Image (cartoon, helix red, strand yellow):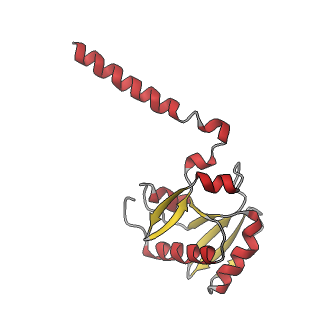
Amino acid sequence: MTGTQDPALLEALKHGARALREAGIDHAVGGGIAVWARGGPPTEHDIDFVIREADVEGALRACEQRGMRTATPPEGWLVKTWHEEVLIDLIFRPTGITVDDAFFARCETMNVAAITMPISCFLTAWRVPLRHLFPIPVGAATVGILAVLIGWWRQ
């Protein structure tokens, strides 16, 4: 994690994760907080959790029981809740991704703001048949560096 994250966002992250965890709802952190947890810049916007579509009503109920406001916007792929003034998106139908047991199995468990939670990553979004292509650019870069070093060493 690089950079200092807004304390209000981290507090919202903790409260949202607690509400979902105590309700027994599988969830993964996504969006800017997931990027930050993996070393990216701090986010300035909101918290994103990915949940199953079947868990939407239970998630809203769990958040309401913890005193959080909730809303169901017309988009049809997410619902919203707020911890104080911080928006938390509960995304249940992300584009191109099926949120199921396999999705959660691909998430990495990380410690974020003193809480261990699943974090989605860009590979989570890749379709299983395409995920094997990821090493190609890494391998090509490695071969290129080795070729330069070998050429330099032979001189």
Q: Position of residue 66 (x, y in %)?
A: 62, 85
* Residue that protrudes farthest toward the top in the picture: 155
Vertical side of 138 occupied by 6: above or below: below
Give left or right: position of 25 versus 30: right
Q: Is 3 or 140 nearer to us in this picture?
A: 140
Left or right of 63 on screen, residue 2: left
Image quarter of the N terminus? bottom left
Q: Where residue 128 sits: x, y (%)?
A: 66, 41
Q: Position of residue 122 (x, y in %)?
A: 56, 48
Q: Where on the picture, by quarter, is residue 86? A: bottom right
* Quarter of the C terminus within the rendering: top left
Residue found at x 62% / y 65%:
27
The residue at the point 61 percent across, 78 percent down is 22
Q: Is residue 150 left or right of residue 79?
A: left
Residue appearing at x 29%, y 18% in the figure: 150
Q: Position of residue 50 (x, y in %)?
A: 64, 62
Residue 129 falls in image quadrant: top right
Q: How many marks?
A: 0
Name which quarter of the figure residue 62 lies in.
bottom right
Whether residue 74 appears in this view of the structure is yes
Residue visible at 77% across and 63% down in the picture: 76
| Viewer can see residue 71 | no
